[in-house]
Image: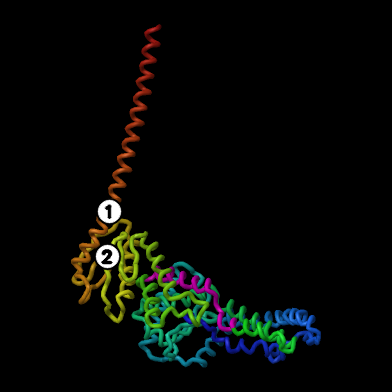
Amino acid sequence: MLLHTLRSHRTLRRLGKLCATGLLGITLSIGMVPAQPAEASILGDVLGTAVIGTMYRDKIMAVYKKYNNTDEGRNKWFAEMKKEEAPDYDWAINNRVDTIMANVIAGIRAVDPTVDKKPYNYYVSANDKPNASCTIGHNLTIQRGILNLMANDDEIAVVLGHELGHGQKEHPIHGVKSAINAAIVAGMADAATGGLASGAINQLYVYTQNVHLTKPQEWEADNLAFDYITHTNYNPGATAACWQRFLEKYGDMNIHWSDHPTCTQRRENYVKKLYKYSNKHVTDKDGVVYVNKKQFVMPVAAGGMSSKERSYFVLGNLAAAYHNNKVIPNAYADGNTVMLGVQPIITCVAGDESADTLAARLNDLNYGKKKKAKKEVKEKEEKKDKEKEKDNKKDSKEVNQKTVKVTSEKGNQ
């Protein structure tokens, strides 16, 4: 999820108390360890009830796994999601999301064929908050607000790729298990000690309910989204652009969501990935696009995007061109659009430098790189020729020496 809180967290918040009172209908033959008046025995009670809590947890997780792994369970969970958050039935919106989901899943399929083993359920909710969330059972909610926030389908594809990355790695069910661990131990220990242990344990419990996924899982989902997007026709620069958009709208956002990297960190992670993807030809520094370590362009704000956000789309187009071409093609202007071979790079608007100017500059930047490459190739060929010539001279000398030796032997005879 972008701003992760699992949909089950309100239920889990009550889980400890429910287990302690037997309201879940799960019974065990082991009785509750009674609270002892002696302070020294409290720790033993806590440990004893934690064991019981573990047994409860395993039974509860067995139920959750049915919702996560079986078609019947997944569909029931999906139905509950729609009850909690009503769907948006707008045809145009749903058709748009269907197309994006199909494209992203095709990108996943290119790198992870297991995506078809547990197909995703998804729907657009009539919630204007800018979020999307993947929960257990490969069930996805896409809030209408995220569609309104993002600049285009490319950025929406990145958001969905991130959520599907969580699903592919089963992060939601792992998060539920962690939450249950905290809920069970907190509730059981509190009951066993008459509330004496509730202070520190309860704080940990409440914290865990709001931190279901770890930062490593967030990074993993981000990195998977990049892999998925680069196997679609979406602009890979949208990976960085969407986090620039979040940054401008909400700030770095990690103050209340400490399980998330900041928007800046996530954006810069994608900039590094784009640099590597471009075979180290292009990067972006503070909204300025660099080609072969030299400044290429700083686009103006346009199309509802800031200058910086737009720069990442230019970066993505360049990265794709350099990634897909071993031999760098010539740049040229096609009307107001700068082309690098068959790859559009930037469509110039009022305030931008002209397409002719940018195409000429791009050729100059590439020419220097190509000239260096040609020089290196030439030097290697010259070195190879010299080594070959040296070997030929050595062979010729050996042949001459043998000839002299044979002639001398005949003369002696």
Residue 61 screen position, x and y as percent: 64, 80
Q: Residue furthest top?
A: 413
Pointers 1 and 2 in contact (C-beta within 8 Å): no
Q: Which of the two discs, 1 and 2, sits closer to the camera?
A: 2
Q: Can residue 332 be seen here?
A: yes
Marks 1 and 2, the one that precedes in the sequence? 2
Q: Is residue 226 magenta?
A: yes
Question: Which residue is under mark 1?
Answer: 370
Residue name at image x 52 percent, y 86 percent: 78
Q: Quadrant of the C terminus?
A: top left
Locate residue 132, reporting x and y percent.
46, 83
Q: Which residue is mark 2?
A: 296
Report the Cα–Cα distance between label 1 and label 2: 16 Å
Mark 1 residue element = helix
Q: Which residues are magenta?
A: 207-233
Q: Tell me: 192 left or right of 324.
A: right
